[in-house]
Amino acid sequence: MRQIDERYLKHPEYGVPRMTDWLKSEGYKINKKRIYRLMRKMGIYAITPGPHTSRPAPENKIYPYLLRNVPIERVNQVWSTDITYIPMRKGYLYLSAVMDWYSRYVLAWNVSNTMEAGFCTSTLNRALEYGVPEIFNTDQGSQFTSDEFTGTLKEKDILISMDGRGRALDNVYIERLWWTLKYENVYPKVYETGEDLYEGLETYFRYYNHERDHSSLGKKTPSEIYIAGNGLI
């Protein structure tokens, strides 16, 4: 599963057939049925033609994508969330995070052994302790289209935006976060337990928010931009 995760980060267009072919070329004796089961368990799908993270729920309402050609000009204008698979030495967990687009500040994060809606709503509620965004963007996964999740946003009068099907770049900032986190922290560390992972992520996100400067932010940190944007300095 670690090999699938690493390859997917580099090639999110890989579906079951291409992932199977690549693993076979690397010497793994594996078939498409097993790769299909593993990718479903990990919550990853080729960015075309379907969604690239969590499974959709046809009975849930899908909201339009509101951010095409919209300039991102201030903090709390747009927040977004996503889920990613975290490989451990034995087993795996899932990580969700909420990010402010303008500053790249990670407002909240959470880990779980499932991808249920409650896990994602809990992360959302932690983020809302910072304030309320104008627009909240997600993919079309069942966790984010659930009444529990969208209802929380509606209660705050937050506009709901959802990625177009097969459009990973609609949520590009948090996709970049996953790549950075995994290559700078998760893969080198190879966490043993959930407790180790939680402590490691706590340290990493503190570093990411308050110490790691971004060229796209003029060599400032996410916290510098987010705090200044809220008029706190």
Image (spheres, grey):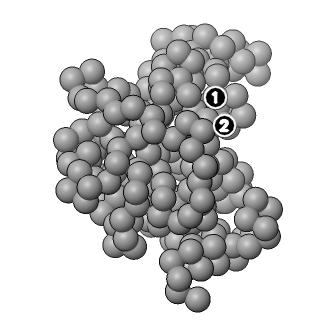
Residue 122 picture location, percent across and down: 29, 59
| Quadrant for the C terminus in the image | bottom right
The residue wearing badge 1 is 12
Residue 231 picture location, percent across and down: 53, 83
Residue found at x 27% / y 21%: 58
The secondary element bearing badge 1 is classed as loop
Q: Is residue 50 visible?
A: yes
Name the residue type under label 2. Answer: Leu
**Rendered image quadrant of residue 56:** top left
Tell me the tag on residue 9: 2
The secondary element bearing badge 2 is classed as helix
Between 232 and 145, which is closer to the camera in this rendering?
232
- CB atoms at circles 2 and 1 under 8 Å apart? yes
Residue found at x 34% / y 48%: 159
Name the residue type under label 1. Answer: Pro
Q: Vertically, is 36 above or below 140?
A: above
